[in-house]
Each structure stands twice: as C-alpha cells, then as structure tokens.
Amino acid sequence: MKILVVEDEERVSQFIQKGLREEGHAVDVAFDGEEGGFLAEVNDYDLIILDLMLPKKNGIMVCGEIRERGVATPVLMLTARDSTDDKVRGLDAGADDYLTKPFAFEELLARVRALLRRRSEAKTPTLKIADLELDPMSRRVTRDGNPIRLTTKEYALLEYMMRNTNKVLSRTLIGEHVWDMNFDPESNVIDVYVSHLRNKVDKGFALSLIHTMRGQGYMLSDEAPPA
C-alpha cells in the first residue's frame, strides 16, 4: 500500500518510515502541513498518518481541508496531547483514528492494518483475474487453487497490478506506488521484480497474465495485448 506520513520530527518520521517500508509499504514523507496537504491532494494514497502539531498548518487544518476537497483517504492522527478535546477535534475534522505519542510501533502497525483493511474491504474483498486470486485481508495468493509464496515487495507489486488489471502501468507509476515518490526511474529494480513475479505467477501455465508492453511498461491481463 502507498502511505503518506506527515510528521515534522525527523527522528519520529524516520522511525515510522523505516518500519512501514519493512512491512512492504511505499512511504512518502512530508515535514509540514502545507506540503502534506498538497501531496494528499495530488497523489493517490491508501492511508495518511498525520501529526497534530505541524509547522505552517496543523494536522486538524490539513485534515479538514483535504476532506473539503474530496480526499477520502483514511487518516490516522498522531498527537502528543492526551486530551479528549484534541481527539474530538481531530475526529470531527475527518480523521478516522488517533494515536497518542509516545507509542509502540506494534500499536501503530495494528491501527494501520485496521484502517487499510477497512479500505481494502470497501474496494474489493478478493482480487481475481482468470484463475489468479489475491485476498488483501489474509495476503494469500493462489493460482488454480495452488498457493504462491511471495516476498513482501513481490506481494505489493502484484496487488498494485491486480487493482489495475488491463491497464498499462509505466515504470514511473509502479515505482511511485510500490516504492515511493523518490524512486529512481532509471533503476532496473522493477524489471527484476516483475521477472521474479512472472516466474512465480505464470511459469507452468498456458495462459500468461503478466505482459511486457514495449516502451510503455507492464500490464496484468488475461487477454493477449495488441501487437
């Protein structure tokens, strides 16, 4: 999943970013409310982790503004104040959950999973194309009923492709959604991961689902692409 972290304390933002990336998420970071609000509007995120106390605009202002502009992405608010008033203000502004600092990363991760699960259930309970199935809740992948073991990043790549079946996905798009906005488009890491994924998903099957679109990127489809 693609997550935006808006947190001005560098130590805290690095701690969150490192942990989420180890879980396979693509993470962008903003260090003030103006930048965070801008990124939340122009990019498609699955979750926003938003600190309450931020330079330029506080988290409540940012949350309220992006909701007014139609951004429905779930928001987890972080606050150093264990105050009922602050929590109520955050929820009233459109936040979906809150977490008081300091926190254990395990608790943050549990809340992230819960919010992402709700979003996944709202989108599609199970992703399917031909005989390939992916369950976002259990993270189980099967083809023709047989389980496929994927690394964390392979799973993230396949889930993104399955949410965008029959669409040509450029390397830039894949890099931004599966890695982050700082991904180097000149790197061949995407081609390497697609090759690994193809070996696990398509090898041994008559029908190939992962297609290379020359000069454009990749597409997941159960139909042969045009020549």
Image (cartoon, rainbow, N blue to C red):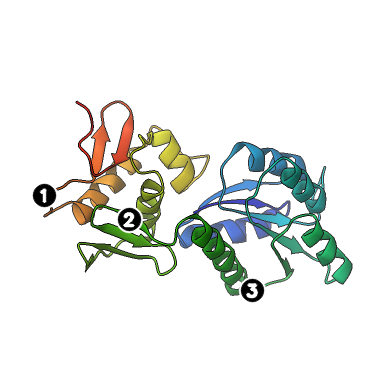
Tag 1 residue: 206
Foreground of the two, 200 or 151: 200
Mark 1 vs mark 2: in front:
2
For badge 1, the amino acid type reads Ala
Q: Position of residue 20 (x, y in %)?
A: 53, 60
Q: Residue at x 31, y 39 (%)?
A: 219
Mark 1 vs mark 3: in front:
1
Q: Residue at x 54, y 67 (%)?
A: 113
Above or below — where is 189 with respect to 111?
above
Residue 59 makes an appearance in the image: yes
Q: Which label's residue is closer to the chain start, 1 or 2?
A: 2
Q: In screen coordinates, is 198 left or right of 53?
A: left
Q: Position of residue 180 (x, y in %)?
A: 50, 44
Q: Secondary structure at mark 1?
A: loop
Q: Residue at x 53, y 58 (%)?
A: 122
For badge 2, the amino acid type reads Lys
Q: Residue at x 83, y 65 (%)?
A: 88
Q: Which label's residue is closer to the chain start, 3 or 2?
A: 3
Tag 2 residue: 128
Q: Secondary structure at mark 3?
A: loop
Foreground of the two, 127 or 108: 127
Q: Residues within 10 Å of mark 2 (few under 14, many from 20)?
A: some
Residue 104's mark? 3
Cα distance in 3D space between marks 3 and 2: 35 Å
Cα distance in 3D space between marks 1 and 2: 17 Å
Q: Secondary structure at mark 2?
A: strand
For badge 3, the amino acid type reads Ala
Label 3 near label 1: C-beta < 8 Å? no
Q: Position of residue 138 (x, y in %)?
A: 40, 70
Residue 151 makes an appearance in the image: no
Mark 3 vs mark 2: in front:
2
**Quadrant location of residue 166?**
top left
